[in-house]
Image (cartoon, rainbow, N blue to C red):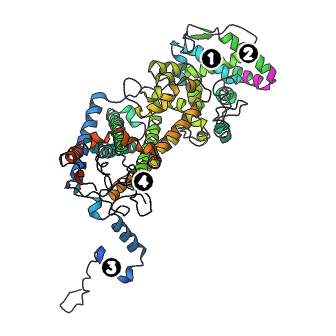
Amino acid sequence: MSATTVDNAGRPFKADRDVAEWKGAYTPYDLVKEFLIALVVVTLLIIGLAVLFGSPDDTPVTVKSWSTTSAFTNPDTGANSPGQVDFAQTAITELDGTSGTATYGPPYNTTTDPGPKLGPLGLQHWAGVHHPINTSEDFVLGPLSTLTGNPQIQSAVTEYRNASPDQQANWNSAYEDAVAKATLVDGKLVVPSGDYGPVGTIISGLTSMATSGALDGSLLSSRQFYGTDYTKPLLFIADGAYLNSLAQAQHLGGDQWGMMNETGSYPGQAWLWLYTLWYQVPAIGNSSNADVYVFAIMIGLTILLALVPMIPGLRSIPRWSRVYRIIWRNYYREAERVGGSGAGTT
Amino acid sequence: MTVTDETPVEPMRPVPTPTASADRPEDAAQWTAKLRHTAVEALPPQQLMPDRQPAYVASWIYVFGVVTIAALVVVIATGLVLAIMGPNWWHSSTTGLFVNSLHLWSVEVFFFAMIIHLWGKFFMAAWRGRRRTTWITGVISFLVSVGAAFTGYLSQQNFDSQWISTQAKDGINSTGAGAIFNVTNFGQMLMWHITLLPLCVLALVGVHVLMVRLRGVVPPFAPEGRADDAEPVGIGNEQTGVEA
């Protein structure tokens, strides 16, 4: 085209933005028929896939199944760990406030850790606490307080609550050292003795609640009869090593491109491949700000994709790539046959 | 009452056709008439449901747009069955598990077709000729569909949804969105999955399809050695599709 050709707004014609009127041939096209054929074929394909492969439905983990599992390989330590021991080791971190949930920060609780930041922007902290969780009370002391028929546990809970923070910290520290060497003997948790005051009774009582299944219900209970918010039990379970060990075995870990995988050999959310790709880049994946970095990158890329038509250079990629020559090969073959008369576009 | 020849009968009034109604001068100010007139003018029936297409619309790549919509129909239909029977049904019923399988595979086919459609349109530079809105609604449809599928995975009530929710919370929370969008709250995720996001997807796909019908299918780039302005007459008007 000549550089002088302009549109009504006085702008020159741009091949990556504008098109000329089609004056070529039109062919019959039965829209309704095409859609119905597509619907039938696609439905049959989907039925075939469903019959052949079905869909996965792996049983969810409960606090009971976690604490009663005979043994599993801890993905963090490589050690073979009985469920009860892992549960007790997790429970003490909930009590002393050192677990992943206890130190998480917003939206669950407040921490001095600034959390993930995007440059100067601490979005997570700015949003504030909206689903408050005090792991010591909500995960340990609160559920034990419901065991009103057990005076020994109630006495331990009262003693712990009435103790000074320093005393609590000393007991917690002593128990944490001891439970690291805990074993399972005849199906019972055995923790080496130590100066941990009521904490031994507290964690032992909570472990009994867990193995009986009572803790699952206690964590789920809310202020109303019907509950659909599983935040507390999910976070408690995720603080332990058991859920992670099952996920690693199912190739669902973050370093296994797990975000786009599904349990078993089923295709998962493959469309999230680019999202999970960034976590495999060491400079991003190893950063404490990885989550917010990846989100920012994906939001930026999505905006770019949506605005491609308005971005000079980016919108020229299709023309430069010449992939369109394959898509419209019949059109260009016809254009060459008639000697460049354009097979219709003018 | 006996009807006799003398009984007065109200004469039948002619059923007004839309065109006749719109043409009545006294009805011209009606909002309904104006809306209908604008809609018919913007998208006449022949354009909404065409029976002919430009000859260049001849490639397998065009199939993936209609396959995406066909898969979406199956997604919605199977989702409706799952919704009618309740979230626990498919965990305990073999029929329910099969419907869940149909739902899963329809989602996989939907995304497979949608992504090929999207990249096909990218390499056709399908935004050319005042088709930017078509492109943008398509990209947003894809984005919202990802959200709809994601909340579906969170609503499965099995090990997969447990793992996905406990992992995804970190990404969502890091943006501050976790304050209102709690991925570990099954009830909230289920409501997003079966009401809010499907409505958004359907609305966006509807607008996208209307835009395709309104602007038509983008023509090819001009062949080499031939200028796009070989026939500059008309560039800049509605028909040529030069950006306004």
Give the SS element for disc 2.
Answer: helix
Residue type marked 3: Asp
In the image: residue A145, left or right of residue A274: right
User: The residue marked by circle 1 belongs to what chain?
Assistant: A
Q: Distance between the residues labelled 2 and 3?
A: 87 Å
Q: Mark 4 points at which residue?
A: B133
Residues behind callouts 3 and 1 on a single chain: no
Q: Where is residue A199 in the image (x, y as percent from the top left)?
A: 71, 18
Q: Can residue A230 be seen in this view?
A: no
The answer to whether the residues at label 1 and label 4 have Cβ atoms under 8 Å apart is no
Q: Mark 3 points at which residue?
A: B23
Q: Mark 2 points at which residue?
A: A173
Q: Is residue A163 above or below residue B211?
A: above
The answer to whether the residues at label 3 and label 4 have Cβ atoms under 8 Å apart is no
Q: In this view, does A186 lie above or below A301?
A: above
State which quarter of the image contains the C terminus of chain A.
bottom left
- Residue span colored magenta: A156-166
Q: Is residue A190 visible?
A: yes
Sooner in the amino-acid sequence: mark 3 or mark 4: 3
Q: Position of residue B13 (x, y in %)?
A: 26, 82
- Of the residues tagged 1 and 2, which is closer to the observer? 2
Residues behind callouts 3 and 4 on a single chain: yes
Residues behind callouts 2 and 3 on a single chain: no
Residue drawn at x 42%, y 27% is A261
Q: Mark 1 points at which residue?
A: A88
The answer to whether the residues at label 4 and label 2 have Cβ atoms under 8 Å apart is no
